[in-house]
Image (cartoon, rainbow, N blue to C red):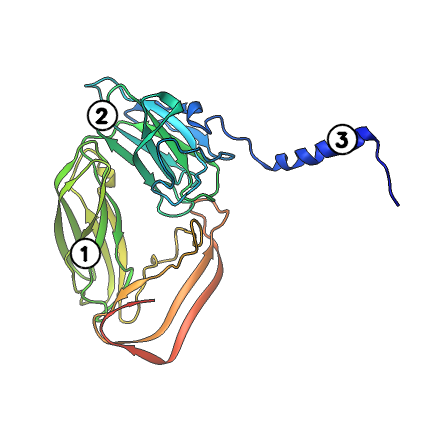
């Protein structure tokens, strides 16, 4: 049976069908493009500005290219701007941008001589290191007094979850070295895992270059060890991986590995520590007590493999490899996830490996 609809109803229905898909899309923020950039005060302390990149679109690059320091080839960005004061005033040549919130996974700083229309020159960038992770603090020195700079905030990847975040622009301290992370095994077997090398990532969060920066590793607890390395030069906003001399723990038990930098203008970021269990059988990178963070695989630009690397310094028998997959999707930062699966690879009889570096 065929039913004919009145002409006006047919047109109304077509309009309804055409409008329905729009209901599922968030409206683009007012600062979706550089011309709508929100002004940030440049102050000595952080006064957060509430913002969002929900509904944001990818700005057409003008003078720069994507990706930045993340992996987003099509970053869904929103824009901000700040102005440096006249020469001789605090903040005239250096600024720091800090964000909170996993929607802000990449922060890019641009200069321009013609305002929001561009073109723009990329001069600094900070990221969170993985999808849906908050970007690190960005520090830029060598800025021009009395100039306007533009800031683009997006996810680390093109498909990262968009949403609320905060942002502020501050005048960085003159002298501020920070320990960003300690790179080590949290479970270390002896004698197979000895000697063991610890590394740390150190950054310059201050406005001036660091020279002859001392970075010290102290091992306490079941074993004792101390080593200091010197970083000859570290530019403002730059970071470096420091490698310490190896140590050979002789006792099973729990170590505390602490990496420190000297006292400076901000002592809140001068130290980080990691607990390490020295045992007879097990290597592990996982944090003692369970996972506390999240990252994603297979996101931007292609599928990836997550591999762990262990150095074997004496012959061992590999009997089991265990891997855990946890679902953190949709959970707020710091919330525990539900386990998707636990994967065991067990070999019987055990496979014997000579002393060498192996990758699982």
Q: Which percent across, then down, holds residue 232?
A: 12, 43
**Marker disc for residue 219:** 1
Q: Residue drawn 35% across and 31% down?
A: 63
Examine the rendered structure and indicate whether residue 323 appears above or below residue 101. below
Percent position (x, y) of residue 112?
32, 25
User: Residue 23: percent from the left, percent from the top?
Assistant: 63, 35
Q: Residue at left 38%, top 31%? A: 62
Q: Which mark is residue 93?
A: 2
Q: Mark 3 points at which residue?
A: 11
Report helix, strand or loop for mark 2. Answer: loop
Residue 180 location (% of width, % of height) = 26, 45
Task: Answer with mark 3 or mark 2, whichever residue precedes in sequence.
Answer: 3
Q: Nearer the viewer, residue 147 or 336?
A: 147
Mark earlier in primary sequence (3, 1):
3
Q: Which of 233 and 69 is in front in this view?
A: 69
Marks 3 and 2, how far apart in space? 60 Å
Q: In which quarter of the image is residue 194?
A: bottom left
Rounded to the nearest angstrom, the CA distance separating label 1 from label 2 is: 39 Å
* Position of the N terminus by quadrant: top right
Left of 326 or right of it: where is 358? left
Which label belongs to residue 275? none
């Amino acid at each position: 049976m065929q039913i004919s609809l009145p002409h006006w109803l047919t047109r109304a229905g077509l309009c309804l069908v055409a409008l329905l898909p729009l209901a599922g899309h968030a409206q683009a923020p007012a600062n979706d493009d550089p011309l709508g950039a929100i002004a940030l005060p440049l102050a000595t302390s952080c006064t957060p500005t509430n913002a969002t990149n929900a509904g944001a679109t990818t700005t057409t690059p003008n003078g720069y290219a994507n990706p930045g320091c993340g992996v987003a080839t099509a970053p869904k960005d929103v824009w901000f701007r700040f102005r440096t004061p006249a020469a001789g005033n605090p903040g005239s040549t250096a600024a720091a941008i800090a964000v909170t919130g996993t929607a802000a996974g990449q922060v890019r700083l641009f200069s321009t001589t013609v305002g929001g229309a561009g073109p723009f020159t990329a001069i600094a960038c900070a990221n969170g290191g993985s999808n849906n992770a908050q970007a690190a603090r960005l520090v830029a020195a060598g800025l021009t007094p009395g100039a306007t700079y533009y800031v683009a905030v997006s996810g680390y990847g093109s498909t990262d979850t968009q949403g609320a975040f905060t942002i502020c622009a501050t005048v960085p301290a003159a002298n501020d070295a920070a320990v960003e992370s300690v790179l080590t095994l949290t479970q270390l077997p002896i004698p197979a895992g000895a000697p063991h090398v610890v590394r740390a990532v150190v950054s310059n969060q201050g406005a001036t270059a660091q020279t002859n920066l001392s970075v010290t590793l102290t091992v306490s607890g079941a074993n004792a060890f101390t080593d200091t390395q010197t970083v000859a030069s570290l530019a403002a906003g730059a970071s470096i991986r420091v490698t310490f001399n190896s140590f050979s723990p002789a006792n099973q038990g729990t170590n505390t590995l602490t990496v420190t930098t000297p006292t400076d203008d901000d002592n809140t970021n001068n130290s980080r520590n990691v607990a390490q269990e020295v045992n007879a059988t097990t290597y592990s990178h996982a944090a003692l007590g369970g996972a506390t963070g999240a990252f994603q695989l297979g996101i931007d630009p292609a599928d990836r493999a997550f591999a762990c690397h262990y150095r074997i310094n004496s012959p061992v028998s590999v009997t089991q490899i265990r891997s855990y997959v946890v679902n953190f999707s949709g959970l707020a930062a710091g919330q525990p996830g539900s386990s998707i699966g636990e994967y065991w690879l067990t070999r019987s009889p055990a496979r014997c490996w000579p002393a060498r570096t192996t990758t699982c």
